[in-house]
Image (tube, grey):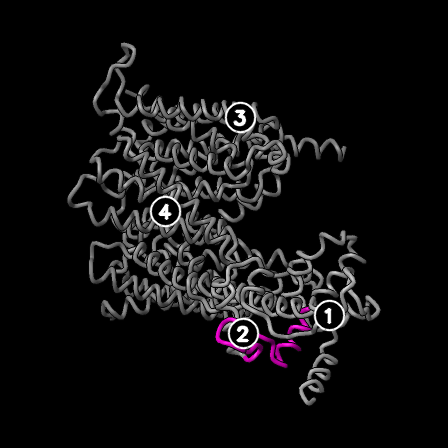
Amino acid sequence: MYFMLGLGGFLAALPCSQVGTFLVIRRMSLVGDAMSHSVLPGIVLGFLISKSLSSPWLILGAGLAGFVTTVLIELIHQKSRIKQDAAIGVVFTTLFAFGVLLISRVSDKVDLDTDCVLHGDLEHLVQSDLVSFFSVSIPAPLLSLFVVALMVVGIVTLFYRVLFVVSFDTALASSLRYRPILSHYLLMALTSFVVVAAFQVVGAILVVSLLILPGATASLCAVRLPKVLLIAALHSLLSSVGGVCLAVWTDMNTGASIVLFGAFLFMLAWGFGPLDGLLWQQIRRRRKEA
Amino acid sequence: MFGALQTALLASLFLGLSCGLIGSYVVVRRMSLFGDTMSHAVFPGVVLGFFLQDEKNPYFILGCALLAGILGALMSGSLQRTTRLKQDASLGVVLVTFFAFGVGLHSLSPQTGVSSYLYGQIAAITDSDLLMMGGVSLLIVCAVALLRRPFYVASFDPGFARNLSYPVKVLDSIFAFLLAAAVVVSMQAVGVVLVSAMLITPAATAYLLTDRFSKMMMLSVGFSILAGMIGCLWSYQQLKTPTGPAIAISAAALFGLAFLFAPQYGVLAKYLRRRQQVRQIRRENTLQSLYRIKEQRSDGKRAVTLSELAQYRRRSPSHVLPELFSLKKVGLIESLSGRDVWQLTMNGEQRAAELIRNHRLWELYLINEADYQTDHVHDDAEKMEHVLKGDLLEALEKQLDFPTADPHGMPIPDPAKTSVLLREGGQK
């Protein structure tokens, strides 16, 4: 049971960590924040169609909402004098408001409440029907999380060069014909994809932490991108295992405790990380004075 | 003390004043993510405020929330100073850490009142809440009024503010504190998750309508109050509707209206302006063509047939005709026989000469100063001639030392002389 909880957390956090690292590198944390809020109406619509929290309709709905978000932001930003950050703020709050409104409209008719969608419910996921997968029986939602994780890691590996070049040098990317706009949309599509997969675990609002924390922690520990991605993956593993332990120990909401453990790991990296660790900074300063 | 409707109106007023004022700075300083971070960062304070006291005490919650907000601002500041993380990532880390802390604490011992702080519930606002909100928004208004100038300078030109020896860092801290206070005022009505909507959307709406910052602040306050009232009344009508989303959607609707119909920066106004410009350019080109056709002739006959003009412009006659009619309406050309034969009036002749002069001067300039080839210059000169006129042209003529012929050997007409010639010709 606990193993399944940890596994579920990890399968949700791993793809988020890989996509989120690119968001952090490209200084697009606000976009990650916006995306995690604005897919909510898509999720609710998908749920209303399929009546289940783990159906492909949700991914379709969230993908659509993510696409609408990206297009609306670009539209407002390009067709008016509104700066990009304000455009993002206007769009994601509006879509999120629509989502909450939809939920409050239908909550007495169907089994969907604000708490579950917004704060996540990993236990519920793990307790759902078991399916057999290569003669291992695991809960169905975990299987779909596994598939999503596999796909996202596969896509990131496949497009690694494109994402890498576009993130660091847009001019070089366009001279290599990598099409920065297209890869921007690829990253946005991946973001909404991992957000919808992970929202059931930590809730729609806290998904952004699975995006930002691993990347931020890893960039305090390493400089080279492959290493950063690897450390981000490690962070997602440790935070889901540690988070589940914390949740079991304190009887806290699992999603929140996964995030809190991830934040704890970030603090460790801040204090003792090999690159910017406060400890080393202090020691270096001492040495200089001495 | 207050009835339901009064509560709604007063809450919208306080909310609009504080969020409208602070939000204007947030939008022009591009601090949307900072606003969002602060609004999420106060949440653990709210939970703690409920957690530590048996009875809901608005002032205690206010204190805890402000403390949490300040801690969040301090943490993101020190992250930016001590690590290589960029501003967005360090704000993001603070946002998720604090919010998760709040959610976790809430799940440990769920308090009933907390959820109204998450999504906003106008019905849950008590009289003492309202008093607290009024006090804090008064504080914000006073602070903004007192510090208007330093804030203004620090927002638009931090370097200049430093030169004026304003304490920019202190000002930034005060601003962060005021932002946290604005979040606290509005969170019971809109909820912490959607405070961003109140900070950004009305100010962005105002930004579409004016260029002056003082006017923008006033408009933004007005839009916030309006959105707050619509949202509060909506949520009163249907108690199931949480107030926060209702307010956010009202604000977004106002933004949508401004985005489409704003007199200067609206999409529609821009489209109309663009279309008008395209038509103007087409009319000017027709006028020039009439002049050129006449110029190429040896006999000096002024009348031009429709088919001649259409052929010269490489367009179909039906394409050229509307332009001819609109030129006729303003008296620049006249028709000699129905729609087939046209000629420039005296005014038209002068206007066409001006345009041609403009074009040829630009051609000359591009070739002399920008090293254009003679056979490439026409298109770019054409683009410039419709936009760059007036005083600039006089300077251009002076720079080119008052030329009389363009690079293709055609004369550069002088409109003053043209009109004199025409008038004399007309008298004969």
| Residue A278 visible somewhere in the drawing | no
Image height of B23 relative to B302, above or below: above
Query: Does the residue at mark 1 contact the one at mark 4 (Cβ under 8 Å)?
Result: no
Which chain does tag 1 point to? B
> Residue under circle 1?
B393
Q: Is residue B164 left or right of residue B190?
A: right
Nearest to viewer (mark 3 / mark 4): 3
* Mark 2 residue crowding within 10 angstroms, few (<14) / some (14–19) / many (20+): some
Q: Which residue is mark 3?
A: A160
The residue under the point 35% across, 42% down is: A65
- What is the distance, in whole Å, between disc 3 and disc 4 at their CAs? 44 Å
- Snapshot quadrant of residue B425: bottom right
**Magenta region includes residue A91:** no
What span is colored magenta in the figure?
A: B331-357
Q: Position of residue B124 (x, y in %)?
A: 26, 58
Is residue B342 covered in magenta?
Answer: yes
Answer few, some or many: residues within 10 Å of disc 4's Cα (few below 14, many 20 plus, some between 14 and 19).
some
Cβ–Cβ under 8 Å for marks 3 and 4: no
Residue to which mark 2 is pinned: B327
Q: Is residue A121 shown above or below B178? A: above
| Residue drawn 66% across the image and 63% down it | B166
Which label sits on residue B48? Answer: 4
Between discs 2 and 1, the one toward the N terminus: 2
